[in-house]
Amino acid sequence: MHWKRLAGLALMLAAPLARGVATFSLVTWNTAGNGVADWSTNSPQIQAMGRILAYLDPDVVALQEIPFTNSWRMPEFVRTYLPGFYLATNSGGDGYIRSVFLSRYPITRSQSWLNRTNLAAFGYDGPFTRDLFEAQVAVPGFALPLHAFTTHAKAGTTATDARRRVAEAAAVSNFLVNSFSPTNYAPYFLAGDLNEDPSRPADTNQQSLPILLSAPTGLLPTLPVNPVTGSGLTIASGSLFARYDHILPCALLFSNISASQVFRTGVLDPLPGDLRSGDDQAASDHLPLCMVFNNPYEQPFRLTAVGVQGRQLRIQWESVPGQAYRVDVSSNLTGWTELVTRLIATSRVSLISIGLGEAPDFFRVGRLP
């Protein structure tokens, strides 16, 4: 407990009523499943992918390019390599490949958005190549559900491909701003194979990433690298040549990044666990992208200002948008009465004014689960 005294008043910050996870981790990975017939755990490709994910042991996994007709095999993959994980496979896809979410924590809802919708309103006369797939995850200790989004943008290096990616990015951005609405304070991210390298765009006049990263979406860029090589390239055709895979978190998650990397087994020496040196190449032509976040709702907070104006006590403290707080009052530090039952923070600073009685009182601010 942290105490602060002022003019016969006693103020304290109360510990949260429940504890959650200290961190949560994310992996996004294009699994190169297009046209792959054998998606069973007998497949060397699936075994390599499974060994890598079992070693990384992430909390949330966004997978792209799962074979559409073989996604029914994903429960077998989960039982073998990530037992107990929740699974969402109801993305729309294009009839050949789709996206999938896996999560250590309950997936309370999953939904496909924009699947094959016409992009004429966004400057391209044709359908969204695949979809925007969302999984809502109940992360322990998060004040609000985590909204995980993934997409697999149009591939290709022609000007037409680039225009289509731009239209897809515009459709995703429009959805995030007007349908999801970042102003609801919920934590969210967009991860996936966006098929555009920020430093090597296929067509300099048609860039999709700046649209996804425009201010209204609330998404921010990250540039993880491999800790051994220092390279941020994620896709290979014989050798690594581009950074096509991305994790774009909202500001709340961005400010709580604790680690990130492009993962490669081929540069590890010695190899940990059951990993094999060639697993990254056997699993996919893309490398998995990993990120770890501190739980933004479990960070210590402190009083930033306390003052009395007339008969009003003004208390200001650090807060997390979307987090609920409670203010209690006591005359003896033994019995407490709720003064403000549930105050939802709308910014990183919360302020409340309280009318003072005749006798000195004690006040405390607590963070609710």
Image (tube, grey):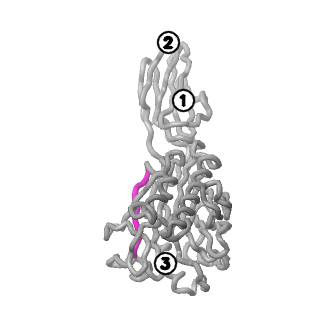
Nearer-N-terminus badge (1/3):
3
Mark 2 or 3, which is nearer the eye? Answer: 3
* Secondary structure at numbered mark 1: loop
| Residue at the spot of label 1 | 334
Q: Residues within 10 Å of mark 1 (few under 14, many from 20)?
A: few
Secondary structure mostly seen in magenta is strand
Q: Which mark is residue 144?
A: none
| Residue at the spot of label 2 | 310
The answer to the question of whether label 1 and label 3 lie on touching residues, with beta carbons closer than 8 A, is no
Queried whether the magenta region covers residue 205, the answer comes back as: no
Specify whether residue 316 is in view: yes
Residue kind at label 2, given as amino acid type: Gly
First to last magenta residue range: 256-264
Q: Is residue 222 left or right of residue 331?
A: left
Q: Is residue 309 left or right of residue 139?
A: left
Nearer-N-terminus badge (2/3):
3
351 or 185: nearer the viewer: 185
Mark 2 or 1, which is nearer the eye? Answer: 2
Picture coordinates of residue 306, whole percent (x, y) = 44, 24
